[in-house]
């Protein structure tokens, strides 16, 4: 179990049982900036950015990408389990990810602590997966963002800032892979809760060069809790998958909402399902969604 972290700004007097001195908002901001700079200098800029691209210490043996692959999307809920009130335990989500057997996995709400061992790197090393991570914002306990895990090396990575609201920082991570018939793009994202903002984000995504050219898979937590302009735009531009009914993935204990989705352009989704195991029902408030994707063949 992860060790409990002290709240940002707690003084020695507070820890000893004395009254905590109040800190002005400006002072709190300076304190947080100093802590971030000391803990991880590369993250001093607080804007959405790519923070990490790395290969595992011992890559899983993987042949070249074939005509079909399995992809998955999973909101890991900051590693805090189904309720969100438990201590972070990345091992729960790591076990669920190992159950999926997916070639490429998109993760949302990934928390990388500032002053502890990075659970994301540990997870990638344990599974022998390549990793790309982009921070959406700085949570009080660390970097919070989206990740892509892959059996194959990730030659190029970019981000698209989708922060159209001051209240919600959002982004998409785009990666390119070498596929049989050319390049395959994978775009992983976590969209906003507000309908209007989510529609702006979808329009920006659909204009992204990665989605407009070549075979592309778009996946993530779309927050599609009801039919809206954003979901209609995605369905119209990318086409609904062959099964037509999106698998419900939220809440994990008794899923009724299809928040997590996988779309494809220039490729075909053969099968899509929610991964509903006993471990998955406890590890997060979302179930993973898994799809089998058929890629274009070489002519």
Image (cartoon, grey):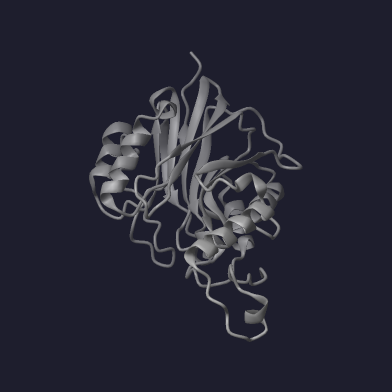
Image coords of residue 163 (percent x, y): 39, 45
Seen in the picture, residue 110 relative to 202 is either above or below; the reply is below
- In percent of the image, x 63 and y 34: which residue is there? 152
- In percent of the image, x 63 and y 75: which residue is there? 11
Q: Can residue 112 be seen in this view?
A: no
Q: In which quarter of the image is residue 211?
A: top left
Q: In which quarter of the image is residue 9?
A: bottom right
Seen in the picture, residue 96 relative to 56 is either above or below; the reply is below
Image coords of residue 70 (percent x, y): 52, 39
Left or right of 279: which side holds 256? Answer: left
- In percent of the image, x 61 and y 28: which residue is there? 155
Choose between 150 and 296: the one closer to the eye. Answer: 150
Q: Can residue 204 be seen in this view?
A: yes
Residue furthest to the right:
58
Image coords of residue 22 (percent x, y): 53, 75
Residue furthest to the bottom:
17
Seen in the picture, residue 34 relative to 45 is either above or below; the reply is below
Residue furthest to the top:
299
Left or right of 47: which side holds 57? Answer: right
Choose between 298 and 59: the one closer to the eye. Answer: 59
Image coords of residue 299 (percent x, y): 48, 13
Q: In which quarter of the image is residue 79?
A: bottom right
Total numbered circles: 0
Left or right of 60: which side holds 85? Answer: left
Q: In which quarter of the image is the N terminus?
A: bottom right
């Amino acid at each position: 179990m992860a060790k409990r972290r002290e709240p940002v700004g707690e003084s020695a007097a507070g820890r000893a049982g004395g009254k905590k001195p109040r800190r002005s908002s400006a002072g709190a901001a300076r304190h947080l900036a100093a802590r971030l700079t000391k803990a991880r200098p590369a993250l001093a800029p607080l804007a959405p950015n790519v923070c990490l691209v790395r290969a595992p210490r011992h890559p899983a043996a993987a042949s070249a990408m074939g005509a079909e692959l399995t992809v998955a999307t999973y909101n890991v809920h900051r590693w805090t389990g189904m309720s969100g009130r438990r201590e972070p335990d990345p091992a729960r989500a790591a076990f669920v990810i190992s159950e999926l057997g997916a070639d490429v996995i998109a993760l949302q709400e990934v928390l990388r602590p500032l002053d502890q061992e990075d659970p994301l790197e540990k997870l990638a090393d344990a599974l022998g997966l390549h990793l790309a991570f982009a921070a959406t914002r700085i949570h009080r306990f660390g970097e919070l963002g989206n990740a892509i895990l892959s059996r194959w090396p990730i030659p190029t990575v970019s981000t698209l800032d989708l922060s159209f609201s001051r209240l919600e920082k959002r982004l998409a991570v785009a990666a390119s892979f070498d596929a049989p018939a050319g390049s395959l793009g994978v775009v992983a994202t976590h969209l906003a809760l507000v309908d209007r903002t989510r529609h702006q984000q979808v329009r920006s995504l659909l204009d992204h060069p990665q989605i407009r050219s070549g075979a592309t898979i778009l996946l993530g937590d779309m927050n599609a809790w009801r039919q809206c302009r954003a979901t209609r735009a995605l369905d119209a531009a990318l086409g609904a998958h062959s099964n037509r009914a999106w698998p419900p993935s939220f809440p994990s204990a008794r899923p009724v909402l299809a928040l997590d989705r996988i779309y494809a352009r220039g490729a075909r989704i053969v099968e899509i399902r929610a991964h509903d195991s006993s471990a998955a029902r406890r590890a997060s408030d979302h179930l993973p969604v898994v799809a089998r994707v058929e890629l274009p063949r070489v002519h």
